Image (tube, rainbow, N blue to C red):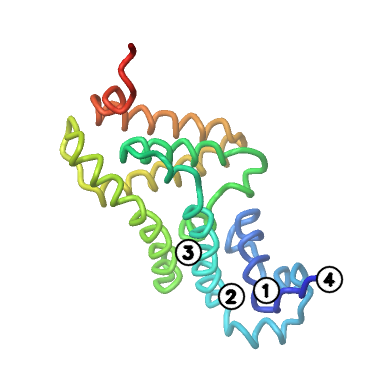
Amino acid sequence: MPPQPRARTLLLNVAIDAVRESGFAATSVEDLCRRAGVTKGAFFHHFPTKEALGIAAAEHWSATTGDLFETAPYHAPADPLDRVLAYLDFRKAIVEGDIAGFTCYLGTTVQEAYAAPALRDACRAGISGHAETLEEDIAAAIALYPPSSPVTPSGLALHFQAVIQGAFVMAKAWNDPATARDSLDHLIAYVRLLFPAPTERSRPCPK
């Protein structure tokens, strides 16, 4: 039998699940302990407050999802714009099933806890850190295919995250993942309009 996760890791994992299901404010220490099968004494041994757990969970979320995105198939295309579009296609493809299963811990938490500076900053660091992983491909696409309107790699990468996080809110409001996928379709269309030539240039000419 594989070794069981330590109490700290169990609490981080259940916190991420619970917050995505019910929100940060509605998730109590008692609920987290029950889900993780640990005592409140064990909780406070690892985390002095629920906010401290929230900050650690933001860092844990960024690390675990970072592994997912690092090995995702959107890195494969040779053309940088194709990689950018493949990233958006990948984000759309994983928007399915239970809403809590595809929405973002960071976005869910910061919507409620933006007035708590340390927790807000931890969420921002995770979102911006992920956006930064896209900047190199976006910069290469801009250099290869000058866009129809001036954009910066950092600005466009953060815009992607704004739309994705907003799409999650729409999915929750409509209780329907299709609403989020529609938003991502509009984002993909925007990128194709922003870079009008590359999609044609990157494909082989018909013989």
Quarter location, residue 78: top left
Rounded to the nearest whole Å, what is the CA distance between mark 4 and mark 1?
29 Å
Circle 1 sits on which residue? 29
Q: Which residue occupies 71% across, 85% down?
A: 42
Q: Callout 3: 10 Å neighbours few (<14), some, many (20+)?
A: some
Where residue 59 appears, as percent x and y from the top left, is 49, 69
Rounded to the nearest whole Å, what is the CA distance between mark 2 and mark 1?
7 Å
Rounded to the nearest whole Å, what is the CA distance between mark 3 and mark 2?
12 Å
Q: Which residue occupies 53% across, 32% down?
A: 179
Q: Callout 4: 10 Å neighbours few (<14), some, many (20+)?
A: few
Q: Secondary structure at mark 4?
A: loop
The earlier-in-sequence mark between 3 and 4 is 4
Dots 1, 3 in contact, CB < 8 A: no
Rounded to the nearest whole Å, what is the CA distance between mark 3 and mark 4?
39 Å
Of tags 4 and 1, which is closer to the observer?
A: 4
Q: Report the amino acid beneath label 1.
A: Val
Left or right placement of residue 150 versus residue 138 in this view:
left
Circle 2 sits on which residue? 50
Badge number at residue 113: 3
Rounded to the nearest whole Å, what is the CA distance between mark 4 and mark 2?
32 Å
Q: Secondary structure at mark 3?
A: helix
Q: Secondary structure at mark 2?
A: helix
Dots 3, 4 in contact, CB < 8 A: no
Q: Which residue occupies 67% across, 73% down?
A: 29
Circle 4 sits on which residue? 1
Q: Report the amino acid beneath label 2.
A: Lys
The earlier-in-sequence mark between 4 and 2 is 4
Q: Report the amino acid beneath label 3.
A: Ala
